[in-house]
Amino acid sequence: MNAAVLVVGLLLLGQAEATPEKKESPAVLSGEALTAKVRVLVKQLDSNQLAQRDTAEKELVVLGADVLEHLPVVNNRTPAEVRTRLARVRAALLKVAVEAATKPATVSLDGEMLVSEAFKKISEQTGNQFVDYRERFNQEIKDTKIKISLEKVPFWKALDTVLDAAELSLYDFDEEISALAYTNRDTNAVARTGHAFYGGLFRLEPSRIEAVRNLKNPDSRSLKLTIDVAWEPRVRPIVLQQPLAEVEAKDENGAKLELDGSQGELEFPVEGTNAGIEMDFPLNAPERSVKQIASIKGKLMATVLGRVEAFEFADLDKIKQAEQERGGVTVAVDECRKNGEIYDVEMRVQFDKAANALESHRGWIYNNECYLLDPKGNRIEQAGLEANLLDVNEVGLSYKFDLGDAKSPAGFKFVYKTPAAIIRVPVEFELTDIDLP
């Protein structure tokens, strides 16, 4: 998005100068044209002239985040000057990509349309995908026509408006899909709009409250508030954390409601690729005269995986401690060796800043995409893996591959994909007017 702003500025500047020669803005390039342009500019980074090197670096940044996937891999053969400049280009473009990824998407819809058309347009505008679960739950499937008017409305508010108009709801808890599943709304279910808090990429809504009294000890009472937390499925959180010291709750009279802070911090790992979880907040039960949690405020910290980068290593039969660095992550392949009937690819992944994502919640890294390409380009999936190094910012893995009839890994290519950036996203929230049981 920042690149688009820069491009508009360049276009306006060009009009103001009224130069007779019109130049195509680099931002409109895509596909082969973009690949060719990047190749020329990268070559220019090694020019003998400082001015040309500076110009090439600036133009690569102006092209925008789409350039990232076209930049060459940095390795031991990359000239020092090119390595330094590519690192700066990547850092600048990754910042743009991170800002775009952590900024809530917006939706514009206007007029009468089928709900299927509304979902399609929302997907096109935001990158968030949807799947119809009504058949899965044996529900009636209707493509209702709705009338809607939204102009650059944040994703969650826009989606809730569409769901309410179509009398649909979301099923947030499927770990196998990186999309939002929708179903028919239950009879007498409340509307989604007006009951949730929208915090950037996240939507929070109180869903359940339970009061417990120990009949053997009348002074032992507790209250548990469950909050449904959902996020735009185009992003992938791996853990949500909430320090209880940063949570404040009050009743309808303004009196403070005490939280059970014995845990210190609530921590909620995100399994699979689902787009929602439940968070339980423990409170000390107030007197029966208290009828409502008038307000509960907090500040969540979401650890989110950023842009995925692909690393490719050729000549596996000769490879020894080969390294590639890209966008804050270094992938190293130490060797490929025969182990009985299979081959082991010994590799390491190291992050400049892992944001604690490799400490207690590293399961995501075992699900990173990894495979071989044989000399004909056929894909060979890994047959298993073992972790042999676990550190704060680094993981060592041994991937197993069955090469079939191949006598050696000569001509094979190792492909590994991993998020390059691991981002900490703060989410401040306030939920109000929650009736007690």
Image: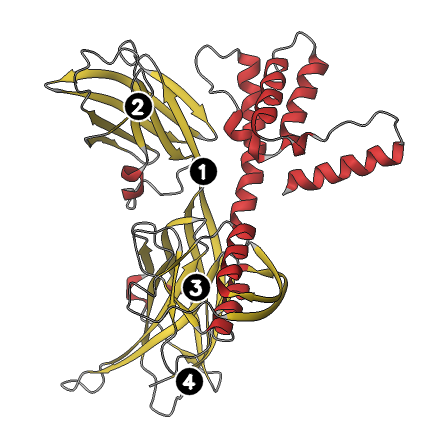
| Type of amino acid under label 2 | Asn
Instruction: Read off the residue under disc 4.
Output: 292
What residue is drawn where x is 64% and y is 14%?
A: 44
- Which one is closest to the eye, mark 3 or mark 1? 1
Q: Could you say where residue 170 lies in the image, as x and y percent from the top left?
A: 39, 66
Of labels 1 and 4, the one closer to you: 1
Is residue 352 in view? no
Asked whether disc 2 touches disc 4, contact meaning CB atoms under 8 Å apart, the reply is: no
> Which numbered disc, 3 or 2, marks the residue that appears first in the sequence?
3
Query: Dividing the picture into quarters, in which one does residue 376 lie?
Result: top left
Query: Pointer 1: what residue?
Result: 421
| Residue toward you, 309 or 147 | 147
Report the amino acid beneath label 3.
Glu
Q: Residue at x 72, y 36 (%)?
A: 7
Residue lying furthest top in this view? Answer: 48
Q: Which residue is under mark 2?
A: 378
Quadrant in which the C terminus is drawn:
bottom left
Residue pointed to by mark 3: 246
Q: Is residue 105 left or right of residue 329?
A: right
Question: 153 and 280: which one is in front?
Answer: 153
Secondary structure of the residue carrying numbered label 3: helix
